[in-house]
Every structure is written in C-alpha cells, then in structure tokens.
Image: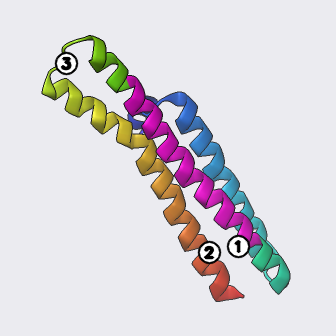
C-alpha cells in the first residue's frame, strides 16, 4: 500500500489522505450527535462536499500526471511498455479519489439510515 502511495505522488496522495481523514472526522462527529436531524443534514452536506472534493482532486492529480508524461513523450522516444506503465501509475490518484467518494456514499447512507 505504501508503494502505491509513493507511486501516486506524495503531494496529491497526501492531500487525498487529508481529505479522507476529514471525511471520517465529520462522519464520526455526526454519529456522536445523532439526535439532531438538522445537524445530521448539515453533516451530510459536509460529507458530500468533502467526498466530491476527493474525487475532483484525484482526477486533477491524474491529469497532471498525464500532462507531464505526455510532455516527456513529446521530446523522446518511449516504448509502449513504458507508456503503459506510466498510464497505470497516473490512475492511482483517481482510484484513491474514487475510493474516498465511495466511502462518502457509504457514510451518507449510514447517516440517512440513523436519521
């Protein structure tokens, strides 16, 4: 798992980890205050914003990675194997962003269920 984290780039993977931790913090906080319906609705909105931010940052990280890969390919000859490896690595941040979004969906469903 640490290998994927370092391959995805410490900047975007670090940002995504902070987003995931904030998502989980809002979820735990809202579970602890589960009596107030207004508070739960507000927490669901926060979760939605944080989950969407995780997805967008993941896609943005992939686009930055693809841009830099294509910049290198523009000036040098690259074999298809190296190209496939680079494209695979560029997907790591998007996958992490999607994982954060899926966690948001699960947390949101749980909160709506206990509401």
Toward the top, the furthest residue is 76
- Pick whichever of labels 1 and 2 is earlier in the sequence: 1
In the rendered structure, find residue 78 and report the number of the disc placed on it: 3
Whole-number angstrom distance, CA of label 3 to CA of label 1:
46 Å
Whole-number angstrom distance, CA of label 1 to CA of label 2:
6 Å
Kindly report the secondary structure that dominates the magenta region of the rendered protein. Answer: helix
Q: Position of residue 46 (x, y in %)?
A: 73, 65
Is 45 covered by the magenta stretch?
A: yes
Residue matched to label 2: 108
Question: Is 7 situated above or below 103?
Answer: above
For the question of whether residue 5 can be seen, the reply is no
Question: Is 56 situated above or below 93?
Answer: below
Q: Position of residue 34 (x, y in %)?
A: 78, 81
In the rendered structure, find residue 95 and report the number of the disc placed on it: none
Q: Which residues are magenta?
A: 43-68
Residue matched to label 1: 44
- Pick whichever of labels 2 and 3 is earlier in the sequence: 3
The crowd level at tag 1 (other Cα within 10 Å; few <14, some 14-19, many 20+) is many
């Amino acid at each position: 798992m640490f290998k994927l984290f370092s391959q995805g780039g410490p900047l975007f993977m670090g940002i995504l980890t902070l987003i995931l931790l904030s998502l989980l913090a809002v979820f735990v906080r809202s579970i602890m205050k589960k009596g107030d319906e207004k508070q739960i609705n507000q927490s669901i909105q926060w979760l939605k914003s944080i989950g969407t931010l995780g997805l967008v940052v993941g896609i943005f990280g992939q686009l930055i990675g693809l841009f830099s890969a294509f910049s290198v390919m523009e000036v040098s000859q690259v074999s298809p194997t190296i190209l496939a490896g680079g494209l695979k690595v560029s997907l790591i941040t998007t996958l992490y962003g999607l994982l954060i979004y899926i966690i948001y969906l699960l947390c949101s469903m749980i909160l709506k269920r206990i509401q």
